[in-house]
Amino acid sequence: MKPKGWKDLPPGSVVLEGGSAVRFKTGSWRAFRPIWHEENCIQCLLCWLYCPDMSILVKDGKRGEFDYDYCKGCGICALECPGKKGKKAIEMVEEGK
Amino acid sequence: MAKVVAVTGNEAVANALRQVNPDVCGIYPITPQTDMMQRYASYIANGQVTTEPILVESEHSSMSACIGAAAAGGRVVTATSSQGLALMWEMLHIASGDRLPIIMPVVNRALSAPLNIHGDHSDAMGARDTGWIQIWSENAQESYDNTIQAFRVGEHMDIRLPVMVCLDGFIISHSIERMEYLEDKEVRNFVGEYKNFLPLLDLEKPKSYGPLILTDLYHEYKRAQHEVMTKVKDVVLDVAKDFEKLSGRTYGLFETYRLDDADIALVILNSAAGTSKDVIDDFRNKGIKAGLLKPRLFRPFPYEEVAEALKNTKAVCVMDRADSFGGYGPLFMEITSALYHLKDRPALINKIYGLGGRDYMPSHAALVLNELHEIAKGGKIRIIKEYLGVRE
């Protein structure tokens, strides 16, 4: 695609559509990667509630994998996760390891 | 039918705003503007307008509120002076970058330190590069007329830029002058119904204002912003033509006074131009061909037209009521830029006058015109930049 020239821009710094941030994948910012251990998950969905992005994918009321396209690895989900019998269902692992 | 009144500049501009009856007004007091917004608040309280007032805790908030209201899709005004304009600084760029036609009378006042409440142009000159259109006014009548015209200029669909209407603090804002009001209906018809452009409050078409734009497109956005400014001159002239039909009063990009055949000329903004015109008459009576150019549209600056108007003069003094410490006065820099491309150009000098409301007297104008007369006769330029009426 040819990059936009100054004459192609809408007046003012206005984005003329909703939801366009979905095209800006921010997962590459991540330094720590959350890993989901399903065996320790009680499906409380606190991770989904606390995620500042929308990176906990939920289907039919149950959480599934992380959306690594947008997860920036803030670790809030891992902190809030109550886990099962003292074992966390979310663990933060250094990227690149 | 025009109504002849005796009012202050602040009252005249407040009345212009009342006649327009904008949707939203950001209100915060600062001398010498306070009295203008106070009057406007009274109009709201008395039910004379339907404007939604936003009483804020600072000018930064006032401009922020105005930006939000204008982006939402309203016709928006506020007013400020001096430190207030300075505090708005970062938000001014956002209003223009987002192309929001906010109309803001600026009652020109000096900047601290030392603290001073009186009229000079340091505040608006400091906002020169914020992307706002600036229209300057000599007296209460011009302030009123320019405020009304500003709506048509800023809101024009090819422009959509915020506009400052500048008038001198105290000298104009607080002095009572004879002037003429238009009828409310005439003003309302002249400015017309406000037309939305990309309003945020349009649920069918969601959009975002002010996103992050980095190295890939920022340069292009700024180039586009300059392009809009290049269209402003024509719109200002068109609006002035319509306004003349309504009011009988003529406006241009600048005013010239006895300049056509002048050998020497003053270039001077706002209220001091009035004093200077009297002294120019005195010099004409003595047989000295003196003239004057008073800029009206300062941003965008009409370089070619100003050069054309001054090209036959022999010596020009640019009078600045603001300073650039370690530089020439801001108006002087514009005029030298305008004239540089002429083959034959007049000798140019720069006087800094009237800072912090120091009186500008006819004797000051005479002093400068005498100096110009000597230079025009072949004398040397003694000094380029000098302070007028300063005690040694």
Image (spheres, helix red, strand yellow):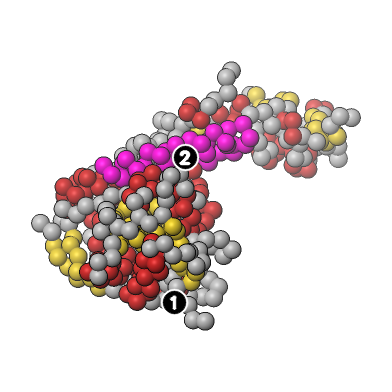
Q: Where the C terminus of chain A falls, by quadrant? A: top right
Q: Which residue is mark 2?
A: B226
**Magenta extent:** B209-238
Rendered residue at 30%/63% (across/down): B290
Percent across and percent down for residue B246 are 16, 49
Q: Quadrant of residue B117?
A: bottom left
Q: Secondary structure at mark 1?
A: loop
Q: Nearer the viewer, residue A82 or B80?
A: B80
Asked if residue B351 lies left or right of residue A24, the reply is: left
Kind of residue sitting beneath label 2: His
Rendered residue at 51%/75% (across/down): B115
For disc 2, the chain is B
For disc 1, the chain is B
Inspect the magenta stretch and tell me whether residue B214 lies in it. Answer: yes
Query: Of label 1 and label 2, which has the lower sequence position?
Result: 2
Q: Quadrant of residue B261?
A: bottom left
Percent across and percent down for residue B349 are 46, 62
Percent across and percent down for residue B184 are 18, 55
Q: Which residue is mark 1?
A: B389
- In the current view of this chain or complex, which residue is farthest to the left? B1
Crowding at mark 2 (Cα within 10 Å: few <14, some 14-19, many 20+)? few
Secondary structure predominantly adopted by residues drawn in magenta: helix
Is residue A63 at least partly visible in the picture?
A: no
- In the current view of this chain or complex, which residue is farthest to the top? A1
- Is residue B75 positioned above or below B317 on the image? above
Percent across and percent down for residue B57 are 48, 64
Disc 1 or disc 2, which is closer to the eye?
1
Q: Nearer the viewer, residue B291 or A8?
A: B291
Q: Nearer the viewer, residue B128 or B39?
A: B128
Kind of residue sitting beneath label 1: Gly
